[in-house]
């Protein structure tokens, strides 16, 4: 009987997981997945930084003015059993750089990540150089990775300073692809968690409420609770104790329709206008008329009379100024219309994108635009 009950409990758990998975892996086309609009608190990247030397440069490294480069080279040689005076070092094929990388969550020892190198001296080009072994530390001062390898700049610089130089991209910064080896892991007991905290990328009270309701509906249980506009707490049910990774995989695929503040974005430099679908306009009358001023110039030739003793041939100019003003009618826009109706109404007035900018600014000033106006 004990074996039968245990088998039945396992079977029920498998069926429940399968049913929830089928419901969650196919979010509606209008909804966004939770994994696209929120993240699990505590699951994030960590920044690493280190100081290193790049060698093998073709005379484009740091000059003697970068004393810290010479001191670093002398210290490195001394650790290898070679004693030199930093003042005697006159090399140009070495450059001091800062090395940065991002340690991904759940990274394990032996994994490799990319490292970015940036010159901090007066080196002109890092192309063809090799980064020497560089310890990379975290915020706590501990070494989490070691970087070393050839540098790829993705650019070049030739003849700089001669007046006919050619440069592409920025040759004083580069990347060591897969050059950082992870040496220390950040230990986490993720599967032992009893509560998950979802951090919404764009905090919104409506979005947080919808997310909590969607998770509860998907699991048919009161697991999620919105704590504030940017945080949703999810209790790990007994069925998923010790299986938190599976629970997160299911939650990430729950569909939620995010809500945002109505905005109208205007770029005055390019004449671009972007309007959100929830933007509304109160009852307002709009009139748009164009003032056109045209100046015509006509050149005439004036000659003296035949057989005249005096007189010269001269060129005279006649100017004509024509002023035309468009007579567009006053157009009434009803209260609460959608943005599509607003666009059709403004197009009926024959306005251009730049005219739209002026109209929306006037609507905002009049208090008729029920949306946030942002000018970039």
Image (cartoon, helix red, strand yellow):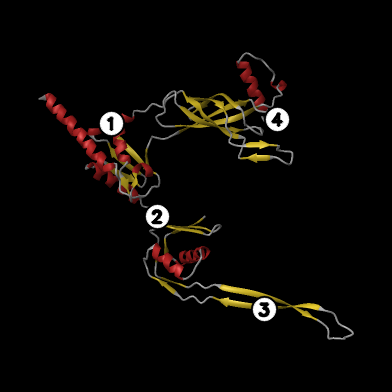
Q: Which residue is mark 4?
A: 65
**What residue lies at 49% left-to-right and 75% top-to-bottom?**
328
3D distance between C-alphas at marks 3 and 2: 52 Å
**What residue lies at 51% left-to-right and 63% top-to-bottom?**
353
**Quadrant of the rendered structure where residue 248 is?**
top left
Closer to the N terminus: mark 2 or mark 4?
4
SS at mark 1?
loop
Q: Which mark is residue 243?
A: 1
3D distance between C-alphas at marks 1 and 3: 85 Å
Q: Kindly check if marks 2 and 1 are in contact, taking CB atoms under 8 A apart as contact.
A: no
- Crowd tier of the residue under label 3, counting other residues whose Cα lies within 10 Å: few below 14, some 14–19, many 20 or above: few
3D distance between C-alphas at marks 2 and 1: 37 Å
Task: Judge whether residue 368 can be spotted in this image.
Answer: no
Q: Nearer the viewer, residue 367 or 22?
A: 22
What is the residue that sits farthest to the top in this orientation? Answer: 81
Image quadrant for the N terminus? top left
**What residue lies at 28% left-to-right and 42% top-to-bottom?**
24
SS at mark 4?
loop
Q: Which mark is residue 320?
A: 3
- Crowd tier of the residue under label 1, counting other residues whose Cα lies within 10 Å: few below 14, some 14–19, many 20 or above: some
Closer to the N terminus: mark 2 or mark 1?
1
What is the residue that sits farthest to the right in this orientation? Answer: 309
- Crowd tier of the residue under label 4, counting other residues whose Cα lies within 10 Å: few below 14, some 14–19, many 20 or above: few
Residue 101 left/right relative to 335: right
3D distance between C-alphas at marks 1 and 4: 58 Å
**x, y (%) of residue 251?**
30, 40
Residue 360 left/right relative to 322: left
SS at mark 3?
strand
- Crowd tier of the residue under label 2, counting other residues whose Cα lies within 10 Å: few below 14, some 14–19, many 20 or above: few
Q: Which residue is mark 2?
A: 261
């Amino acid at each position: 009987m004990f074996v039968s009950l245990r088998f039945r409990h396992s079977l029920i758990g498998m069926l429940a997981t399968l049913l929830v998975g089928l419901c969650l892996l196919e979010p509606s086309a209008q909804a966004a997945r939770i994994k696209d609009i929120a993240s699990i608190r505590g699951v994030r990247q960590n920044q690493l930084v280190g100081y290193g030397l790049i060698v093998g440069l073709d005379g484009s490294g740091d000059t003697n003015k970068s004393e810290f480069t010479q001191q670093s080279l002398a210290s490195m040689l001394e650790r290898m059993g070679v004693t030199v005076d930093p003042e005697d070092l006159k090399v140009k094929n070495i450059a001091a750089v800062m090395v940065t990388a991002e340690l991904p969550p759940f990274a394990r020892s032996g994994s490799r990540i990319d490292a970015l190198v940036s010159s901090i001296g007066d080196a002109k080009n890092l192309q063809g150089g090799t980064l020497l072994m560089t310890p990379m530390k975290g915020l706590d001062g501990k070494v989490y990775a070691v970087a070393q390898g050839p540098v790829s700049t993705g650019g070049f610089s030739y003849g700089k300073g001669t007046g006919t130089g050619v440069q592409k991209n920025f040759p004083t910064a580069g990347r060591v692809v897969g050059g950082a080896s992870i040496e220390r892991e950040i230990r986490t007991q993720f599967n032992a968690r009893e509560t998950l905290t979802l951090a919404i990328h764009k905090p919104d009270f409506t979005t947080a409420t919808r997310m909590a309701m969607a998770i509860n509906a998907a699991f048919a249980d009161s697991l999620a609770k919105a704590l504030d506009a940017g945080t949703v707490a999810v209790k790990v049910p007994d069925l998923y104790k010790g299986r938190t990774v599976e629970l997160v995989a299911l939650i990430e695929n729950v569909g939620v329709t995010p809500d945002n503040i109505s905005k109208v974005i205007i770029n005055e430099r390019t004449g671009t206008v972007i309007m959100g679908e929830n933007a509304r306009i109160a009852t307002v009358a709009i009139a748009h008329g164009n003032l056109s001023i045209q100046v015509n110039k006509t050149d005439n030739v004036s000659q003296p009379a035949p057989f005249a003793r005096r007189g010269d041939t001269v060129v005279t100019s006649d100017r004509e100024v024509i002023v035309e003003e468009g007579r567009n009618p006053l157009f009434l826009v009803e209260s609460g219309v959608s943005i599509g109706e607003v666009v059709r109404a403004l197009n009926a007035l024959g306005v251009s994108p730049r005219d739209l900018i002026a109209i929306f600014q006037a609507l905002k000033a009049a208090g008729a635009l029920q949306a946030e106006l942002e000018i970039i």
